[in-house]
Image (cartoon, rainbow, N blue to C red):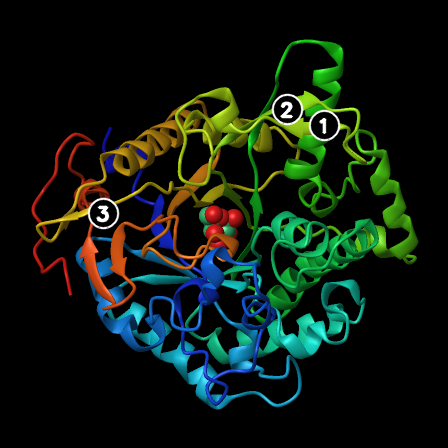
């Protein structure tokens, strides 16, 4: 397997998200987001850690992006922190915040790296949460204002946009389970947030296109290949429900198919939040769909589980190889998901906008050897190649993630990066997986490792 097997237009990149890497959270630099607030609630985050400093990308972006360039990475997906450019969520913009992203974008372009901008990667301005956040239908207008500001500020240099990052995760973890910001719980919050996020994903894309018709607009979905525990009727039904929830809930309305209420009756309660015309406003012809895949899920019937009557059997219980997230190591999952998604009529091209794995890393003599991460990424890429060979339109692959970073409720414990970060000293070391990716992008065969031209620690 070589890079050239994927064709010269295939997009190769890395992904990050603002709150997970930037730091720069002082109030004179940025308005507070729901994550700034949530991390201060005791017991919510592993060891009560915060993203206040994270990778200090706010101050170190030139060195980090220079390393990307030295690794032959030509596309960088990052997100804009809404409250950095609109500290109160709406109204007065912060020129200082806008200038930070101007510098990042300009620096990328100066090194021939194409910026891919995610508009919302979970860090809602706290001031908007104080008014109900995603549960308040007004968010459609708040979001529209924010999207317009982004396109007007950066659209002369950015033409690849992703509207939302994994709406299922931020509504599920943030508004149903309460384990992510803003820590809301319950079905009512979840369904309201879901419907408004689904409306915003379509509306946001329409706004970008109306201001910048040549842009390439997509949005991203978390998705996992799902299998029933046993081939018996009740597990099949349970698996279909989990599939509707995890893989279809936000995709199908976007494709004009409405919510998947057939398998998941509980979703009928979204009706309560629907207004006339909403059904139509949920759909939009995206230029691409971002697929974010890490593992597969095995599902069993669970009569006492509310709403879904289903349960995931986690990797440790199944005694299979797993990552630090307790996710099964199963790189084939991305192939199955690409196949499943590409079978929808009118599906635009797919781009894998996140794929990666967290393993324990050790620094030995200033180096980090991470063969398991390297193998996972190489195998996932080869599964993407398999999908392409079968004629599936998948046009890009972004690794999650460039730097070890703040992994939400898990804090700094799970390391996903191609680059190791010592969070005390902020020293970076390129891991073997990063060296492998650099060599692969230079068109070495998947088995070779080439020496990098520049210093790989700083
Ligand atoms: C995704 C998310 C990323 C990152 C990754 C690894 O759900 O978009 O921000 O945390 O998972 O868990």
Q: Nearer the viewer, residue 124 or 394?
A: 124
Give neighbour class at mark 1: few <14, some 14-19, many 20+ (Cα, 10 Å).
many
Q: Which residue is mark 1?
A: 310
User: Which label number is shown at residue 434?
Assistant: 3
Q: Position of residue 403 (x, y in %)?
A: 32, 57
Element at badge 3? helix
Q: Nearer the viewer, residue 376 or 218?
A: 376
Give me the residue at 79% from left, 24% from top.
Answer: 303
Q: Are marks 2 and 1 in contact (CB under 8 Å)?
A: yes
Horizontal arrangement in the rendering, residue 345 relative to residue 75 (left or right): right
Cα separation, mark 1 vs mark 3, equals 38 Å
First along the sequence among labels 1 and 3: 1
Q: Position of residue 380 (x, y in %)?
A: 37, 32
Q: Which residue is mark 2?
A: 299
First along the sequence among labels 2 and 3: 2
Q: Residue furthest top?
A: 232
């Amino acid at each position: 397997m070589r890079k050239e097997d994927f064709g010269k237009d295939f997009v190769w990149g890395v992904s990050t998200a603002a709150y997970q890497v930037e730091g720069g959270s002082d109030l004179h630099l940025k308005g507070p987001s729901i994550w700034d607030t949530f991390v201060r609630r005791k017991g919510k985050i592993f060891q009560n850690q915060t993203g206040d400093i994270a990778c200090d990308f706010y101050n170190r972006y030139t060195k980090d992006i220079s390393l990307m360039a030295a690794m032959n990475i030509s596309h960088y997906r990052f997100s804009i922190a809404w409250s950095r450019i609109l500290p109160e969520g709406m109204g007065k913009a912060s020129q200082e915040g806008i200038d930070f992203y101007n510098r990042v974008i300009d620096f990328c372009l100066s090194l021939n790296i194409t910026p891919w901008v995610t508009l919302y990667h979970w860090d809602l301005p706290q001031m908007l949460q104080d008014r109900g956040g995603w549960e308040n239908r007004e968010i459609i207008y708040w979001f529209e204002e924010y999207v317009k500001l982004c396109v007007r500020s950066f659209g002369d240099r950015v033409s690849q946009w992703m509207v939302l990052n994994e709406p299922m995760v931020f509504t599920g973890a943030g508004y149903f389970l309460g384990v992510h910001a803003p820590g809301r719980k319950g079905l009512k919050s979840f369904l309201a947030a879901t419907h408004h996020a689904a409306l915003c994903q379509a509306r946001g894309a329409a706004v970008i296109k109306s201001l910048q018709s040549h842009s390439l607009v997509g949005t991203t979905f978390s998705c996992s290949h799902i299998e029933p525990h046993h081939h018996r009727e009740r597990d099949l039904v349970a698996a279909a429900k989990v599939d509707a929830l995890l893989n279809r809930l936000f995709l199908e309305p976007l494709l004009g198919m409405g919510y998947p209420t057939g398998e998941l009756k509980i979703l009928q309660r979204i009706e309560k939040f629907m207004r006339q015309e909403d059904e139509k406003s949920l759909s939009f012809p995206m230029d691409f769909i971002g697929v974010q895949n890490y593992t597969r899920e095995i599902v069993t019937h669970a009569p006492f589980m509310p709403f879904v009557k289903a349960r995931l059997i986690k990797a440790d219980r199944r005694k299979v190889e797993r990552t630090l997230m307790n996710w099964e190591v199963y790189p084939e999952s991305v192939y199955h998901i690409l196949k499943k998604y590409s079978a929808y009529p009118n599906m635009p091209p797919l781009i894998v906008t996140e794929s990666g794995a967290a393993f324990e890393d050790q620094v030995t003599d200033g180096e980090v050897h991470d063969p398991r991460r390297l193998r996972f990424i190489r195998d996932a890429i080869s599964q993407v190649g398999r999908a392409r060979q079968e004629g599936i339109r998948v046009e890009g692959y972004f690794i999650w993630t460039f730097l070890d970073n703040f992994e939400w409720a898990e804090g700094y414990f799970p390391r996903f990066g191609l680059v190791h970060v010592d969070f005390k000293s902020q020293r970076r070391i390129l891991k073997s997986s990063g060296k492998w990716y650099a060599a692969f992008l230079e068109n070495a065969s998947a088995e070779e490792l080439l020496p990098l031209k520049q210093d790989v620690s700083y």
